[in-house]
Image (tube, rainbow, N blue to C red):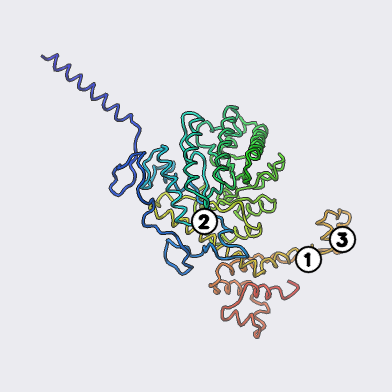
Amino acid sequence: MTNTKAGMLLLFFLCFNVILHTVISVDPHTCPANLDGDCDFDDSAEWEGEFFPGIPKIKYEGPKSKNPLAYKWYNPNEEILGKNMKDWMRFSVAFWHTFRGTGGDPFGAATKMWPWEDGSNSLAMAKRRMRANFEFLEKLGVDRWCFHDRDIAPDGETLEETNANLDEIVALAKELQGTKIRPLWGTAQLFMHPRYMHGGATSPEIGVYAYAAAQVKKAIEVTHYLGGENYVFWGGREGYQTLLNTDMERELDHMARFFEAAVAYKKKIGFTGTLLIEPKPQEPTKHQYDWDAATAANFLRKYGLIGEFKLNIECNHATLSGHSCHHELETARINGLLGNIDANTGDPQVGWDTDQFLMDVNEATLVMLSVIKNGGLSPGGFNFDAKLRRESTDVEDLFIAHIAGMDTLARGLRNAAKLLEDGSLTELVRKRYQSFDSELGAQIEAGKADFELLEKKAMEWGEPTVPSGKQELAEMIFQSAIDRDEHLFISFYLQILLPVSHVFRNQSSRTHRNFLIGRFSASEIWDSAFEDEAI
């Protein structure tokens, strides 16, 4: 009897152990963040109703509006410098940050699970996300989006299965986008999978190189199929952690051959979009080969790829490389390589890629100065490669962030247009170099002035007179376009910079009267400061 009880007890514990092992070994399933917290649908369930109920189509209401779900500065059909605002901007939503961002970081778990999410990476979930994406675009009034291949469709067991998954999702995207919406650009995700830990186009393993090529080939095909206007290469793993085990020359040669193959395939299938390289100095690698715009331009020149590629400049990447976004944009522009902008910013107090929405009007104005001088960005545009902060967890935050980012850039466009139409800043720059607007200057710029001629002129002229750089005046003019209603700010600087100028000595001058009542333009500041030809 005792043996029977012991046997039954042993059998009970064995069965309990099997059940317990089965439960804890099952893949975890995360419930959607419904109000009641219940898992009330499965992967295959079709979503009912809107993804963003209660969110209206976002409209322009003007600067005085207090509505967070309205545009204050972005008026798409308003003409600025002969072009509609929407054509200057060509805004795009980044699928990865908007619909795959969870708020997780190396120190903490995900903080947001949108109501339509079930935590899976199934095809059904991918389709649901895609439908949410197009509802978001429609309500925001944006007709472009950007994607990585693996953001929109899950990996399969084989490359063939993965491509089939991608085809299924792309077919749905084609149906949903219709004739109005299209990708600003597509790209291949060559950085997350462990196979790419040493890089894709720069991997020392030929099998990885071939796999990366196959993935890019497919990504170019689907971008073309969807009517994409550009294709981006971002080399997050194309670099090194240490030079001790790296043949840099060989890796750069391999990357050039990879790009040449991409150019050839693009032409073969009739894809007319622009190929873009996105510079970034580091993260996740210690050193990326496309460190900044100048480095990328040099690479393209060395390998004869100028004319085949342009650059996608990301503002946060610019600051990581030790430059301002304006510097990177100007470097790309003067080299004929400015093709697209990933509109975001970083936190100046941290040293990594924070991908925040650009909210600084000063920065946006500088960005738009470069864009206007470039004649626009088409077929490129502004992609919001930006994500909500980890602590921003409401669905409406997705809209608020994009609205604020679009308004900031729209205000920057208005300010930049005002600066260029006023002409004061342009004239200040022209005057700095006016000594070159001479016969000798023309010879120098044409490459016809040798050292003997320049030595002769130096001896003839003697010690040169070096004029003021007028940096503070340039900054004042710049601020006058931004703080258009805050004349006291400019008055303060006028008193510091020009305390004994004729503006104040001549009590009857129109500028002096306008100064006293706070009414003057940037051009009047300019005229007053430079009326004396000795300045």
Left or right of residue 310: residue 186: left
- Tag in front: 3 or 2: 2
Local crowd size for mark 2, using a 10 Å CA cut-off: few (<14), some (14–19), many (≥20): many
Instruction: Tell me residue 513's x, y (percent).
Output: 61, 83
Q: Which quadrant of the figure contains the C terminus?
A: bottom right
Q: Secondary structure at mark 2?
A: loop
Q: CA distance from mark 3 to mark 1?
A: 14 Å
Above or below, 26 against 47 in this view is above
Q: Residue at x 73, y 64 (%)?
A: 432
- The mark that comes first in sequence, 3 or 1, is 3
Who is closer to the viewer here, 64 or 491?
Answer: 64
**What's the mark number on residue 358?**
2
**What's the mark number on residue 465?**
1
Q: Secondary structure at mark 1?
A: loop
Local crowd size for mark 3, using a 10 Å CA cut-off: few (<14), some (14–19), many (≥20): few
- Tag in front: 2 or 1: 2
Residue type for callout 3 = Lys
Above or below, 243 against 147 in this view is above
- The mark that comes first in sequence, 3 or 2, is 2
Q: Residue at x 20, y 19 (%)?
A: 11
Residue type for callout 2 = Leu
Q: Which residue is mark 3?
A: 457
Q: Residue at x 58, y 52 (%)?
A: 341
- Tag in front: 3 or 1: 3
Who is closer to the viewer here, 362 or 334?
Answer: 334
Instruction: Tell me residue 352's x, y (percent).
Output: 52, 46
Q: CA distance from mark 3 to mark 2?
A: 49 Å
Q: Secondary structure at mark 3?
A: helix
Instruction: Tell me residue 150's x, y (percent).
Output: 49, 38
